Amino acid sequence: MDAFFASVEQRDHPELRGIPLAVGYDGPRGVVSTASYEARRYGIHSAMPMMRAKRLCPHLTVVSGNYARYKEVSAQVHAIFHDYTDLIEPISLDEAFLDVTDNKRHVPLAVDIAKEIRLRIREEVHLTASAGVSYNKLLAKIASDWRKPDGLTTIHPDRALDFISSLRIEKLWGVGPRTAERMHYMGIFTGADLRKVPLEHLQEVFGKMGRMYYDFARGIDLRPVETEWVRKSVGCERTFLEDIYKSSVLLIELYHTTEELVRRIAKDDFDGRTLTLKVKFSDFTQITRSLTQQRILVTKDDILPLAKRLLQEVDYGAEHPIRLLGLSVSNPSQEAEAHRVEWVEGFLEFSD
């Protein structure tokens, strides 16, 4: 979906149409959840601090958002998806993969299904959606972002390698800012550059991810559409109204974060053995620290001592205060077995 939260707000509230709009908390520590395309022209994007967004666009309109409403609209869109296939992998409220190789409407071409779905979303939900069509999830994802908003892009197998060759490395799945920086240092700026690097060297530098980058550079992605979602972690985080550098105050915040994490673990009935501490500093740099135990981490007595140990490993102070603390438990004791399959012809991806 295109700028989903903002688009729903503009659809439901005509006075918001055509103006720069951000959905999120309008406070000193608020961040942009979604920005309308009118706001994006000013350089505003998701996860940007709201204060910065308002400096970029002084006449920006901010709404707090209505998550229940967004879930309701998302369900309407997914109902349309299910008219064509039940092989749907939700990524978020506004993004999903569809495997339409054997579809309910017996439409031979995936691109024709994408056209039908986009038309129905426009007519029935009164929103626009962008879609990517290709033979695997990697390329469908890239294609869905290619002509936003309200776009449709198809990447045929015959031209996939040429397409990837000219692609900026940042566009590949799993290549974040730090990985991209490391690749740039290695002289890797495009898919063609990545394709020249031997598998052994990529694995040496990037570990298990090296194999994935090697395959992606060749248009290979064997991951199937997973219709059953298995929770991999449970977490929570706290953004402070003011940056914190005193240990006594941080320990109190860590205590409250641990209590919230324990409540979420109980609610989701989650078993995990790895505790991860996330720290974001005042300059927005971010680090994580993790510990893995043999026992399952469930109670405050299990988690708080480990969280304190992890916090001791963090270098902070008056010149380097902390903006955010987060805790998560992962490494579930039982995970669904992954199934690998050969590539299938018709993958659609609808994204924000």
Image: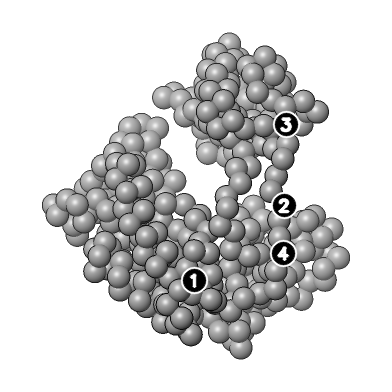
Q: Which of 247 and 276 is in front in this view?
A: 276
Q: Quadrant of residue 312?
A: top right
Residue 157, x across and y down, in percent: 61, 84
Q: Tag 3: Cα neighbours inside 10 Å, few (<14), some, or many (≥20)?
A: some
- CA gap, disc 2 and disc 3: 18 Å
Circle 3 is placed at which residue position?
A: 273
* One can see residue 194 in this view: no
Viewer-side label of 2, 1: 2
- Disc 2 marks which amino acid? Glu
Q: Which mark is residue 337?
A: 2
Circle 4 is placed at which residue position?
A: 340
Which element is circle 3 on? strand
- CA gap, disc 2 and disc 1: 24 Å
Q: Which residue is drawn at 77% across and 25% down?
A: 295
Which element is circle 1 on? strand
Residue 166, x across and y down, in percent: 59, 79
Viewer-side label of 4, 3: 4
Q: Tag 2: Cα neighbours inside 10 Å, few (<14), some, or many (≥20)?
A: few
Mark closer to the chain start, 2 or 3: 3
- Disc 1 marks which amino acid? Leu
Cβ atoms under marks 2 and 1 closer than 8 Å: no
Q: Residue at x 59, y 30 (%)?
A: 269
Q: Tag 1: Cα neighbours inside 10 Å, few (<14), some, or many (≥20)?
A: many
- CA gap, disc 1 and disc 4: 19 Å
Q: Quadrant of residue 297?
A: top right
Circle 1 is placed at which residue position?
A: 348
